[in-house]
Each structure stands twice: as C-alpha cells, then as structure tokens.
Image: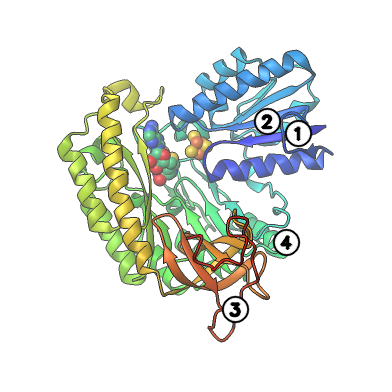
Amino acid sequence: MKAHLITYGCQMNEYDTHLVQSQLVSFGADIVDSVDEADFVLINTCAVRGKPVDKVRSVLGDLRKQKQKRPLVVGMMGCLAQLEEGQQIARKFEVDVLLGPGSLLDIGQALESNERFWGLQFKDELHGHIPPPPAGRLQAHLTIMRGCDHHCTYCIVPTTRGPQVSRSPDDILRELDLQLAAGVQEVTLLGQNVNAYGVDGGARLAGYPSFADLLRLVGQSGVRRVKFTTSHPMNFTEDVAAAMAETPAVCEFVHLPVQSGSNRVLRRMAREYTREKYLEHIAQIRRHMPHAVLATDIIVGFPGETEEDFADTLSLYDAVGYDSAYMFIYSARPGTPSYKHFQDLPREVKTERLQRLIARQKEWSNRKNAEKVGTVQEVLLRGDAHESGFLEGHTRGNHPTVVPKAVGADGAGIVQVRIEHATPHMMYGRILGEGGQPLPELPRFTPESSALSSPLQMA
Ligand code: SAH
Ligand code: SF4
Ligand code: F3S
C-alpha cells in the first residue's frame, strides 16, 4: 500500500497523524509525498472554525473525482470525523474510512474491512499506545492528555475529542525515553488544557503528579528543551510558573489564551476567569521569569461584543505586551452553545476589528523582537532555510530565527546566536562559538548579486 496523509488543525492533530502513520508503516505501507502516487489518502481534519471544514470539503471533492478514474481508498480522521457534520460530508464524498480522534488504533481493522468502516468510539487503549519517535528530527510532540472538560460556549473541541483523559506519567516518560534515544532535543507536551493534567472530571487521579511536578519530572529526563501547549488560565497555578523557573530545560515561553479582554465577553464565553485574574497570572509568570515570552489566542467579534468590549481587548494587549498572538474571527460552530443562543455579528464588523488587533499586535511584536537585538539566544536549528546558505530554527521563546551557515555549524542542532536584526515575524543573527565570538561564515553565492553576500543583506 502507498499511503499519503494530509493534516489540518493543531499540534494534537500533527501528533495523531504521526501516530497513525507509524501504524501504517508497521503494516508495511510506504508513505508517499503526493496524492498522485498514493492508493490510500487519509485526511486528518479540524472542526474548530468554518474554514478548515471548507478546506476538507474541497479536498474530498478532488479525491472523489480521482476515485472515478483509478482505484483509491479515501479516509478521514480527527475532529471533524467525530461530528454529525463530518459524517454527512463523508457520505456525500464517498469516504471509505472514518476514524474519530478516539478510534485511531482501529486503522488496521478499517483497512482490512472490505466495506465502509466508521470508528467513532473513545477507546482507552489509545492512552497506553506509544508511537515510535519521529525519525531524524530534533523536535517531537508528546500528548499528555486527550479531550477537554471545559465548556467554552464557542468551542466544538469537547464534542470532537470528548472529556479529558490524562495519560499515565509512566507512559509519558516511556515515550519521552524513546524520543531521547532517537536524538530528540526539544519536546512539546500537548493537551487542550495541560494545567489540568491529572485532574480528570474534577478529581485528582491517584499516582498522577500535578502539571507543575510533571514539568519537573520531564525536565530531569535529560531533554534539552521542554515546551507545552495549551494552558487554560482557569487552571494555571503559580506552582507552574515556579516549576518553569527552577527547571532549566523548561523554556520560559507561555502560551496563555485569553480570548477576550472584556469581563462581559469572558462571562458569555464561560471562560471562568476575569481579566483581573488573568493579569494576576501574567504578573506571577513575570515575577518568576522576568524575561518570559508570552503568547495568546484571541477571538474577535464574539456574539454581542461591543466596541467597548473590543476596546478592553486592545487595552489588555497593552497591559500584557504579547510577543505573539493567534487572532481569530469568531466562527459560529453548529453544536456549540453560542451557535444556538447568540446572534453572530456582521462579517464587516468582525473583519474590521481583526485588522485593528493585528495592527496592534504587530507593534508589540516589533517592539518585543527589537528588544532582542544584541542579546544571545539559544536556537534550535532545524536545517536549511529558504535562502541558500542560511539555516532556520527557533529560540526558546519560539521566535523563528535565520542564521548564515558557519564553519562547524552547517546543519541541524542547538546553537547560541547573537541577534543582529529583527522584524515582527523573524529574527536574524550569527552563530557564536565557544568563546562567544561569531563563528566564521561559510561562503555564499547568490544569483542576484553574482557575488558573495553579507549576512544582513537578506534581512
Ligand atoms: N484548548 C485550547 C484551545 C483549543 S482551540 C485553549 O483553551 O486554550 C484553539 C483556539 O481556537 C482557541 O484558543 C480559540 O482562540 C480558537 N477558537 C476556538 N473555537 C473558535 C471559534 N468557534 N471561532 C473562532 N476561534 C475559535
Ligand atoms: Fe475549547 Fe475551552 Fe476546551 Fe480550550 S478549554 S478546548 S477553548 S472548550
Ligand atoms: Fe482542530 Fe481538533 Fe485541534 S478541532 S484545533 S484539530 S483539537
């Protein structure tokens, strides 16, 4: 079998694609890079907003056409597959295999079956399953919990992924050991709400550490860098900030989605915290880690959001000063409480507010990144950048960074970099040697200049 996998959605979906892909490989499948080469195409889907759903519809439309011309098995997995909306789409586009996020290990059974196979149960076996580490990569994801116990009124995730189930610390550490043995240097712990780790359905599980203690445990494993996502402010504790500060491997980077700066909107979203409480968490983080890098998620144009509410979001931006933010226009998702009970705002109102917020964030990213010029940052280089002769990677604070290749540093790895130039989206610098001096650069040839270029010409 020649299989091609396509992934939409968040890092949890990327992890799940890797999990299913490794199952396919263990059954003898070849993983191919394009739909044209494949006889099995599997799409990992997202349902969090309307756009990713539209995307799946259009890809499935193309695949249905191909199916009329040649033998092709089409599969759909992940969040959208779990919803009635997704199942309707699957019927319409003649999808052969459908696997919800809790049924991924049914993939073998699905491929053996001669008829349409739909797996939609949440199965416990998934939690103990340890996929092999990603081959030849310095970064890995590690799912520490599945599902979500919150009920934010706009969000479809608790429906698609079910209630929260934490993985046992043993399974987590066993998977981490395999990743370390394979050369992984940075691990990102994943969950919809990692701060609630070990407290499923409101009850602490016996023998499970708190998330702060899990960070300490993972930090002792020998891994060079630990990151995590996502944190819900409601479950964030000061001990998490303390554990981050005292555990050198844990990166001083916090992605703490706020969604809105208005208490009235936060209440209607059922986020279970106030703006004031949120700002207290930010103060705690800064107290423990003065140079913490902060990121957030925002929903613009939640139903009933007034100009005054939006002004509260802008002022929260200025109160926090985020290094980066994911900003979304509210998307009414069938099956969520806000879809049922609230009236959506006009498109133009939402778009106009988003533009204003993006502009504000750009100012902050610009200012925050400019502050890094002249500092030394630890960068995990992934490999060649778009521009030849350069390498790309990211800092402990997740800033994308580009450096010229240097003598003794021309591939993937962790290096020290002096930042020389920054834009709102990218930092540029030079790799330092042991003594803190820039390493000599490798010569470069650029077609534009037909000459050797200086490192900052591209910035
Ligand atoms: N569990 C994570 C979020 C997962 S979804 C958390 O609570 O932080 C990722 C982001 O998508 C959310 O933070 C939110 O900003 C956005 N999102 C979720 N539902 C949305 C919707 N209906 N419309 C627009 N954005 C949405
Ligand atoms: Fe969705 Fe809220 Fe759960 Fe995050 S915490 S996945 S936004 S319900
Ligand atoms: Fe999308 Fe599911 Fe992730 S809905 S954002 S893929 S949890």
Give the residue number, with chain letter if any, for mark 3.
Answer: 439
Q: Residue 3 bears which disc, if any?
A: 1
Where does the N terminus fall, quadrant-wise? top right
3 or 2: tag closer to the N-terminus: 2
Question: What residue do we see at 34% from left, 65% from top?
Answer: 285
The picture quadrant where one finds residue 416 is bottom right
Task: Give neighbour class at mark 4: few <14, some 14-19, many 20+ (Cα, 10 Å).
Answer: some
The kind of residue tagged 3 is Leu
Task: Give neighbour class at mark 1: few <14, some 14-19, many 20+ (Cα, 10 Å).
Answer: many
Query: For the view shown, which residue lies furthest in the bottom direction?
Result: 435
Q: Residue 182 bears which disc, if any?
A: 4
Q: How many angstroms separate mark 2 from mark 4 (CA)? A: 26 Å
Q: Are marks 1 and 4 in contact (CB under 8 Å)?
A: no
Q: Is residue 346 above or below residue 385?
A: above
Please state which of the two labelled residues, at mark 3 or mark 4, is closer to the viewer: 3
Please state which of the two labelled residues, at mark 1 or mark 3, is closer to the viewer: 3
Query: For the view shown, which residue lies furthest in the front direction?
Result: 450
1 or 2: tag closer to the N-terminus: 1
Q: Position of residue 303 (x, y in %)?
A: 26, 29
The kind of residue tagged 1 is Ala
Task: Give neighbour class at mark 2: few <14, some 14-19, many 20+ (Cα, 10 Å).
Answer: many
Q: Is residue 226 above or below residue 298?
A: below
The kind of residue tagged 4 is Ala
Q: Is residue 247 above or below residue 12?
A: below
Q: Are marks 1 and 3 in contact (CB under 8 Å)?
A: no
2 or 4: tag closer to the N-terminus: 2
Q: How many angstroms separate mark 1 from mark 3 (CA)? A: 43 Å
Question: What residue do we see at 26% from left, 34% from top?
Answer: 352
1 or 4: tag closer to the N-terminus: 1
Question: What residue do we see at 56% from left, 26% from top?
Answer: 56
Give the residue number, with chain letter if any, for mark 2.
Answer: 42
